[in-house]
Amino acid sequence: MKYKQKWLPAFFIILLFHARAMADGGATFFIIRFSIETTQHEVSKGYGYISEGNIIRDSFNSTGYLMRLLDQSYEDRSIKDSMAYYKGRLKYSSPANPLIKDPIGGLYTLTDLEHLSFKRIKKMRIDTIMPFSWVPGIMSPLKMADTIWLKNKPVRDIEIEPLSCYYRVIIYESSPRINDIMKKIALLVKKINDMQQVNEEANNKERQIYELLKKLKGEKVVVIEACSC
């Protein structure tokens, strides 16, 4: 009975932010902090993103359900016998910008993705449920180790507005690879701006911009994304 009592605050938090999001006409997202106890009696902490629509509140006491709910294997399903989860939660305060402001409390992203075999998981429980917004959001796959160079002053701050998305590329250390990618993006943006109307070709070019921004992974860059759809 003591174990079940720990879930009551979580239910109230979910209902509170669900009501707030519905009032604003938007969807509700959360960052979940949880504990994992392994079959070797080791306890570790992890984080995961979830949407309110995926939550079955009556199943919070089920470790099997929590493994499925909090598995972060969205794009990479190659390791099917393991649960993917994040080890860290990083807060980022972007340089002041009048066009796009950080949400109240700052921008957050989860870092350092790890995998743990489902067979090794004995028990899981939710520790904390925190509201989270994707708009704006951090597109860059940062690591906790990146907090060292994030303390430095950026050398460039570039805004990109192709169609339905706004991107802010904050560069902390330049490189030939970054310069090449940004030149290609600038060319695509110009082609979109020169078009008389928005069509499939323009949408394809915007998707190309997104794919180019993903190639900045590993560089000392933070990409902030805000899309209208």
Image (spheres, rainbow, N blue to C red):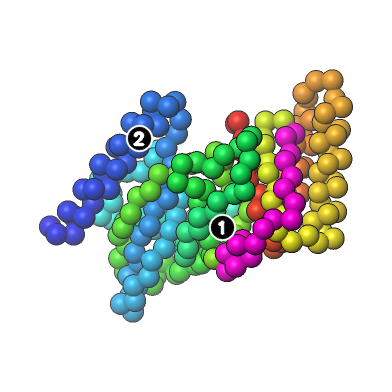
Q: Which is nearer the eye, 223 or 76?
A: 223
Above-or-below relation of 27 to 223:
above
Q: Quadrant of residue 201?
A: top right
Residue 174 placed where, x, y %? Answer: 78, 60
Q: CA distance from mark 1 to mark 2?
A: 30 Å
User: Residue 209, image x and y in percent?
Assistant: 76, 42
Q: Residue at x 68, y 41 (%)?
A: 167
Question: In the picture, which quadrant includes the N terminus?
Answer: bottom left
Q: Is residue 183 above or below residue 191?
A: below
- Identify residue type, mark 1: Arg
Q: Position of residue 187 (x, y in %)?
A: 87, 40
Residue at 33%, 54% in the rendered image: 128
Whether residue 77 can be seen here: yes
> For the residues carrying marks 1 and 2, which lies nearer the camera in this image?
2
Q: What residue sits right under mark 1 in the picture?
A: 77
Q: Position of residue 48 (x, y in %)?
A: 44, 55
Work out whether residue 83 or residue 129 is closer to the camera in this orientation and state it.
Answer: 129
Asked if residue 203 lies in the magenta stretch, the reply is no
Look at 78% across and 24% down and name the residue there: 199
Q: Is residue 84 visible?
A: no
Along the horizontal axis of the image, is 17 left or right of 108? left
Residue most toward the bottom?
40
Q: Relative to 97, is 27 on the left or the right? A: left
User: What is the magenta range?
Assistant: 145-162
Q: Which mark is residue 18?
A: 2
Label tally: 2
Is residue 87 found left or right of 93 in the rendered image? left
- Furthest-top residue in view? 196
